[in-house]
Amino acid sequence: MWLFNRNGASGFSSSSTAEEVTHGIDGSGLTAIVTGASSGIGAETSRVLALRGVHVIMAVRNIAAAEDVKETIVKEIPAAKVDIMELDLSSLASVRKFAADFISSGHSLNMLINNAGVSGIPFILSKDNIELQFATNHLGHFLLTNLLLDKMKETTRKTKREGRIVNVSSGAYRVFTYREGIRFDKINDPESYGRFTAYGQSKLANILHTCELTRRLKEGGVEITANSIHPGAVATNVFRNLGVFDGLVSTFGKFFFKTVQQGASTTCYVALHPQLKGISGEFFMGNNLATRTAIARDMDLAKRLWDFSMDLVK
């Protein structure tokens, strides 16, 4: 059940499902990469895009789980075009291998949906010695986007169709972000680490990444848009690291949280709907344009994050 269902300017609301917001849209001939597609809103995003005729590349860490999702999709949609490729966003080497393998596959790329994420985990360093939430939620997607951008530009030129990048952020950045936004000098500091504020920091980074990426795309005259979205509070396994809270979500989630079908809707709306043609650098929630806090509109901070991220990925 979702309590707030008044339609916005788009004609949709927070209670709209991914199928509803893409009804009647033909995605044939388009190819999309969806990260974190083996469960939750990533799996539903993959299913609905496939339903609309999009060739979906499920970029996942858990191949076995992805195979189950693919089997379910193909059983429902026999004509679905779905492939699986391995990707661990917490590992820069894995991101580079995925991008190289995808480019060598010869596939076109119209949509990149940066959906995967972790939430509320204790302080852990990634394989590259970077705090894991920042590494997975922001840095892996930052590198992936940069490595695939030329392929997207090539596809846009050849097909004359707008490319779209969707960064799945979270409204949690408003509540949990560190006061200074991004702790550039304390990314790996275990003493000042907070599992929720670190999550909020990584989600703010998604929005700032979108801002600076949009500026660069517009400056280059590239017909690719980039937008960030808040899927809403969805009862998925993103809560799997939160102990007792995870149990509460499982028990009472249906009363207070969106369904997965509703949670995937804003991603699918921004990725596929013709209403969004030419719209870039914005933040969406509930299938409508949403406002951002001042820190999420800070272009100087966005530029600093870009440079900082470039240094980390070398």
Image (cartoon, rainbow, N blue to C red):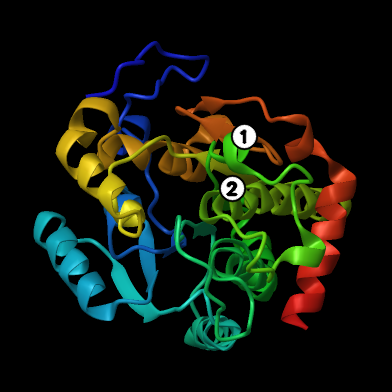
Looking at the image, residue 130 lies above or below residue 116: below
Looking at the image, residue 258 lies above or below residue 74: above
Sooner in the amino-acid sequence: mark 1 or mark 2: 1
Check the picture and name the quadrant holding the C terminus: bottom right
Looking at the image, residue 9 lies above or below residue 19: above
Q: Inspect this view and state whether residue 46 appears.
A: no
Q: Residues within 10 Å of mark 2 (few under 14, many from 20)?
A: many
Residue 66 in the image, given as x and y percentages of width and height: 25, 71
Front residue of 215 and 196: 196
Check the picture and name the quadrant holding the N terminus: top left
Q: Is residue 121 left or right of residue 184?
A: left
Q: Is residue 279 left or right of residue 169?
A: right
Q: Residues within 10 Å of mark 1 (few under 14, many from 20)?
A: some
| Residue furthest front in the image | 191
Q: Residue at x 67, y 59 (%)?
A: 192
Q: Residue at x 54, y 88 (%)?
A: 97
User: Tag 2, which secondary structure?
Assistant: helix
Residue where numbered disc 2 is placed: 200
Q: Residue at x 55, y 79 (%)?
A: 126
Q: Amino acid at mark 1?
A: Arg
Label annotation for residue 158: none
Residue where numbered disc 1 is placed: 174
Dot 1 and dot 2 residues touching (CB under 8 Å): yes
Residue 259 in the image, given as x and y percentages of width and height: 25, 36
